[in-house]
Image (cartoon, rainbow, N blue to C red):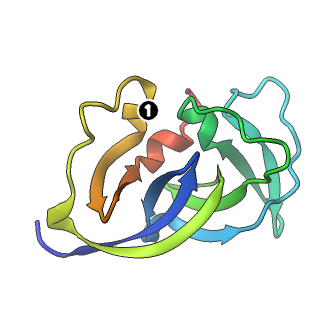
Amino acid sequence: MTGERLFTTFYLDGHLFGVEVGTVQEVIRYQEMTSVPLAPSIVRGLINLRGQIVTAVDLRRCLDMQERTPDRLPMNVVVRTGDETVSLLVDEIGDVLKLDVARFEEPPETLQGEAREFIRGVYKLDGKLLLVLNTERAVSLDS
């Protein structure tokens, strides 16, 4: 494959993740959430986005990472998949990166367990890896 892809990047527990720009509706600061009784543990709540009710999914919980400390509020990366709009809760927003498709690699063998299902692949950058998130898997509520 040839060409370039654009990624919106963000951080979780110091790791750099990315989703394709075409799936991102917007990036916003922390929004108050309404909890949802009996919802899967990855659902932190619902947010009201200018009249649209959006499910907020905590990516730390999806990836079995430690909980965010109470003094750090998450940011929202609002993504569209099919006919759904979902907010991915992340620690910090990064940059938009343009990357050569030819540099895309399969997930490393060291990535094991549940987390492997959420990662499409990686890009090796200067001194770090960009983990490309499988957005459809991350927003599926059967985690």
User: Which element type, helix, strand or loop, lies under badge 1?
Assistant: helix
Q: Quadrant of residue 40?
A: top right
Residue 9: where, in percent of width, then height?
49, 64
13, above or below 94, in the image = above
Q: Given the current orientation, which residue lies at the most extreme front position?
A: 127
**Which residue is found at the position 44% from the left and 60% from the top?**
19
Q: Quadrant of the C terminus?
A: top right
- Residue at x 57%, y 49% (from the top left corner): 12
Q: Is 38 above or below relative to 69?
A: above
| 40 left or right of 82 in image | right
Q: Residue furthest left?
A: 1
- Please give the residue where the numbered disc 1 appears in the rendered image: 115
Q: Looking at the image, which residue is at 68% across and 59% down?
A: 76
What amino acid type is highlighted by mark number 1?
A: Ala
Q: Front-most of 57 and 17?
A: 17
> In the image shown, does 53 or 71 lie closer to the viewer?
71
**Rendered-image quadrant of the N terminus:** bottom left
